[in-house]
Image: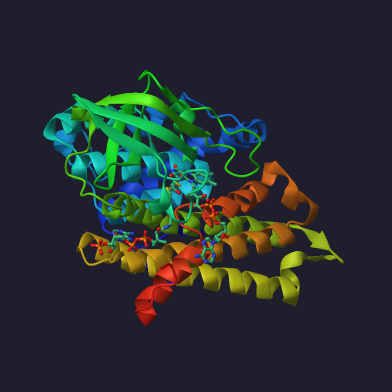
Amino acid sequence: MIREADFLLMEELLSEEEKIIRDTTRRFVEREVLPIVAKHYEKGTFPYELIPKVAEVGLFGITTPPEYGGAGASYFSYGLACQELEWCDSGLRSLVSVQNSLCMYPIHAYGSEGQKQKYLPKMATGEIIGCFGLTEPDAGSDPASMRTTAKKVKDGWVLNGNKTWITNAPIAHMAIVWAKTEEGVRGFIVERGTEGFETPEIKEKMSLRFSPTGEIVLEDCFVPEENLLPGSSVGMKAPFSCLTRARYGIAWGAVGMAAFCYEKALSYAKERIQFGRPLASFQLIQQDLADMLTEITKCQLLVYRVGRLFDEGRASHVMVSMAKRASTMMAYRVVRKAREILGGNGISLEYHVIRHLCNSETTTTYEGTNKIHALILGRHITGISAFK
Ligand code: TGC
Ligand code: FAD
């Protein structure tokens, strides 16, 4: 499935259409992103010129129906694309995850027909980039404790509060903001340019440096009635359903990250001579490579099965939690082994592994930390909630 580490011949399980989506995505990242990613990572900048190119390959709105400008592809194909994107960089996959799962999905699932017509086609072309505001300074793992409020006024709502650690906030044209109304949490579309809406950038982060991250500051921000997502039920179910889709993409992406680093470590170990022999000839290095390939293969099987179940409508959000947690933890370990095999070169951006290593600090944190996913699984297994 991922060419670098397809030990169990999973390629044979893909349809021709799935192979085309995977290979088109790989060609795109190899040509357009891999050559520039290290430079931008070092500077902490994002190449805006990439956005129309990402759209041209069909990576925005992959699962959105064609009548709204999307590709109408399966979630399995979406997973394959995420894997190829994160083979290059987690921030690149984040750009696509947020646009697809956290912005286009809620508009398609919970938006009015007018909202779908207004936003989705332009989001598919990249003319509109979205961001998703759930996390707050005092509400991270427990977003239900959010403080952001939406007060009903004539013809609309007034939003007040702060969201933080929001991917793409500094570059987004609009935000999906979750806020507490008198009845409970609801979703709102807030467009850039609205008075009382600011998105200061979070600088000096040492992970996901290829991805713009910011805050959303809402100060007496008036949002017209037509910007409420009408189909979202009151409460956390709607925002959580978006998280499930983004977590699913991260689970696939982490396999791509690990496969990149495995391949890099393998070729390095074959070429690098120490004690008169290639590193790959030493038993301890062979053990590391065996562990890396085995771990990647186990997670390939996991995301493959969850992907197929997703398209059959049979994947529960707990299955997705297992896949997100297992896959990102696997990548965390595999990337560290790769970095060690590369010795001093392992910390050079030229070899890309240190970039993946720093990114793995975020992929095990956002979209629910590994501990939170363990507790989601624990609640499912025992029937006892550790949260309340
Ligand atoms: P809880 O009682 O668990 O659930 C309330 C209702 O929602 C349902 N539900 C879900 N539905 C769909 N998908 C899911 N993933 C769901 N999780 C829960 C649940 O069945 C229930 O329904 P009902 O009918 O019984 O009312 O609510 P809780 O408040 O106790 O939640 C606990 C917990 C820990 C599971 C939840 O707070 C959680 O998942 N916390 C983690 C927070 C998180 O993941 N934040 C992510 C922010 S976005 C982000 O990080 C983007 S990074 C993007 C990128 O750059 O790639
Ligand atoms: P906390 O919730 O404060 O957790 C701190 C530590 O305590 C963690 O180790 C956690 O596992 C542990 N912990 C918490 N509760 C428990 C418990 N009950 N039992 C045991 N341990 C516990 N959010 C968005 O809404 N939109 C975005 O686009 C977005 N993008 C992000 C991009 C980046 C680069 C990053 C780093 C984060 C992003 N986030 C986004 C926020 C992300 O979802 C949160 O950081 C994450 O959910 C964890 O919340 P927190 O940082 O507040 O940590």
The residue located at (63%, 46%) in the rendering is 355
Quadrant occupied by the C terminus:
bottom left
Q: Would you place residue 228 above or below residue 101 in this image? A: above
Give the x, y percent position of residue 65.
18, 41
Q: Would you place residue 192 above or below residue 82 in this image? A: above
Q: Along the horizontal axis of the image, is 381 left or right of 154?
A: right
Residue 219 seen from this side: yes
The residue located at (64%, 61%) in the rendering is 266
Q: Would you place residue 357 above or below residue 158 in this image? A: below
Give the x, y percent position of residue 12.
33, 65
- The tally of labels here is 0
**Viewer-proximal residue, 14 or 64?**
64
Q: Quadrant of ligand 1?
A: bottom left
The residue located at (35%, 75%) in the rendering is 380
**Viewer-proximal residue, 239 or 71?**
239
Give the x, y percent position of residue 290.
61, 74
Residue 99 seen from this side: no
**Picture quadrant where residue 227 is located:** top left
Q: Along the horizontal axis of the image, is 113 left or right of 7?
A: left
